[in-house]
Image (spheres, rainbow, N blue to C red):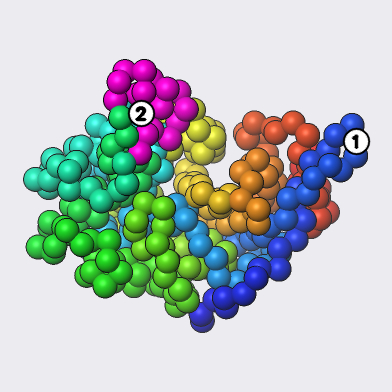
Amino acid sequence: MIPEIRVPAHEPLVHLLRDGMVEGVHHGSAVVLAPDGRVLFAAGDIEAAFYPRSAAKPLQATAMARLGVDLSPAGFAVAAASHSGEEIHLAEVCRTLDGAGLATEDLRTPDDLPFDPVERDAWVASGRTASRVAHNCSGKHAAMLATCRLHGWSTKDYLDPGHPLQRAIAECVEDLTGQRIPKVAVDGCGAPLFAVSLRGLARAAGKIAASAPGTPEGLVAEGIRKHPELVAGTRRDVTALMRAVPGLIAKDGFEAVQVAALPDGTAIAIKIADGGDRARRPVLAATLALCGVDPDVLEPTPGLRVTGALAELDLAA
């Protein structure tokens, strides 16, 4: 199956209330899959092609694990990360590069400041300027470079969609999602960005979460579970969520994308149409509740209430 490229038929998912009256509406789509792939819940358009952004990083890390890259659990965690730019993140990125005989100059990430505002302010106050290693995707790029070095592939053009590494990642994405890739774009970090459907993204996350220890998928899941602070950061909601829900793997992406999966393979994928991140957490809490998780593990967002099909399930107030 190839996801269709169309304007997704999103539905109202979240209301912003002021003194009891609806002031704003966030549209979007969400899906919850059972371990066997059955749809337990769907709202909006779960079949249309969309860009998963950084929510695809666990899939990309799995591709590199399949290619045999030798990383510690922490290394796989930061390979799947959109990190905050804390020292723990930068140290792990450098460890991956050092292990492959590479340096931060080999990264092709754009120069950037740390993603976390606290880290960014401290970085600037110390006199440091934007750098490649501070980019939130540097862990993924370091793992890509290490994989290229392992196979003797060029490290100069590793972001080219025709590079052996990127072709292998595309094949892995198609295998995990069970769908053909309908379009390839360029992500904000310069890496190829493969369009998928929400159903396909959830299917892939479920496979990774339920994989056996020691398998490529299992190595990625192990890293994410052992080091949630490396996947995001000490002040990030995704890290807090994984610490609160045993065995959960979760990854957010720019433009309000979220994927999450439990150890049994039950999986969630969410896309908020307007890219507004404030609506992501209420929808995530409601869909997690459908999976039997206490929605209170996510800090409530004042004034926001799920609506439409989510509200009909009585999963959140």
Q: Position of residue 298 (x, y in %)?
A: 63, 35
Q: Do the CB atoms of the residues marked 2 and 1 lie less than 8 Å apart?
A: no
In magenta segment, residue 13: no
**Mark sitting earlier along the chain (2/1):** 1
Question: In the displayed structure, does residue 244 sit left or right of residue 124?
Answer: right
Which residue lies at the image location 26% right of the left edge and 57% below the top edge? 65
- The residue tagged 2 is 86
Q: Which residues are magenta?
A: 112-128
On screen, 120 above or below 248? above
Q: Quadrant of residue 168?
A: bottom left
Q: Secondary structure at mark 1?
A: loop
Q: Residues within 10 Å of mark 2 (few under 14, many from 20)?
A: many
On screen, 11 above or below 281? below
Q: Position of residue 127 (x, y in %)?
A: 30, 20
Q: Quadrant of residue 293?
A: top right
Inspect the image, locate mark 1, and give the three-letter code of the amino acid beneath it: Gly
In magenta segment, residue 124: yes
- The residue tagged 1 is 20
Which residue lies at the image location 35% right of the left edge and 70% below the top edge? 170
